[in-house]
């Protein structure tokens, strides 16, 4: 699980750190990787939670995270298209707890 900001501002970094802290309390191990978010997601606004295509666990996690963010009044959306090889070697199982990989991109607040 990776979290990245684009662009890096005090607001985007603070939100990314808050998301990382909450996920850590839920026993996930998020890491801050701004380059990965920028290279994978490009330019975006709000929060994007990208999941591994074809992975039910990853998709369910992305949808749950986005629902929670939206409940908190944060503009967020789900996107598919990630590949497990981007996260780990060897490739994780396509189902199960170990395969719940998502990339969380935190962008500027939509105006």
Image: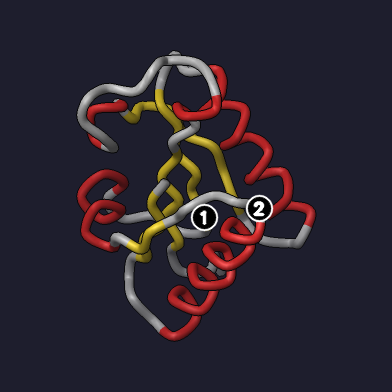
Vertical relation: 80 (above or below) 93: below
**Residue 60, image quadrant:** top right
Q: Where residue 95 appears, x then y in whole percent?
A: 49, 15
Q: Residue at x 41, y 20 (%)?
A: 53
Q: Where residue 36 appears, x then y in whole percent?
A: 24, 52
Vertical relation: 54 (above or below) 91: above
Q: Residue at x 52, y 59 (%)?
A: 46
**Residue 62, image quadrant:** top right
State which mark lies toward you, 1 or 2.
2
Tell me the quadrant of the picture where the C terminus can be found: bottom right
**Residue 33, image quadrant:** bottom left
Query: What kind of element bears circle 1?
Result: strand
Q: How is the image coloured?
A: secondary structure
* Label annotation for residue 47: 1
* Label annotation for residue 56: none
Vertical relation: 105 (above or below) 40: below
Q: Which residue is mark 2?
A: 26
Few, some or many residues within 10 Å of mark 2 (<14, 14–19, 20+)? few
């Amino acid at each position: 699980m990776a979290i990245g900001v684009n662009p890096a501002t005090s607001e985007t970094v603070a939100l990314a750190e808050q998301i990382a802290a909450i996920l850590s309390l839920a026993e996930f191990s998020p890491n801050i990787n701004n380059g990965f978010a920028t290279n994978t997601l490009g330019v975006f606004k709000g929060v994007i939670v990208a999941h591994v295509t074809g992975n039910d666990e990853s998709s369910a996690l992305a949808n749950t995270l986005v629902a929670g963010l939206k409940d908190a009044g944060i503009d967020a959306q789900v996107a598919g298209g990630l590949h497990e090889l981007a996260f780990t070697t060897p490739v994780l199982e396509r189902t199960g707890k170990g395969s719940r990989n998502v990339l969380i991109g935190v962008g500027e607040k939509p105006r």
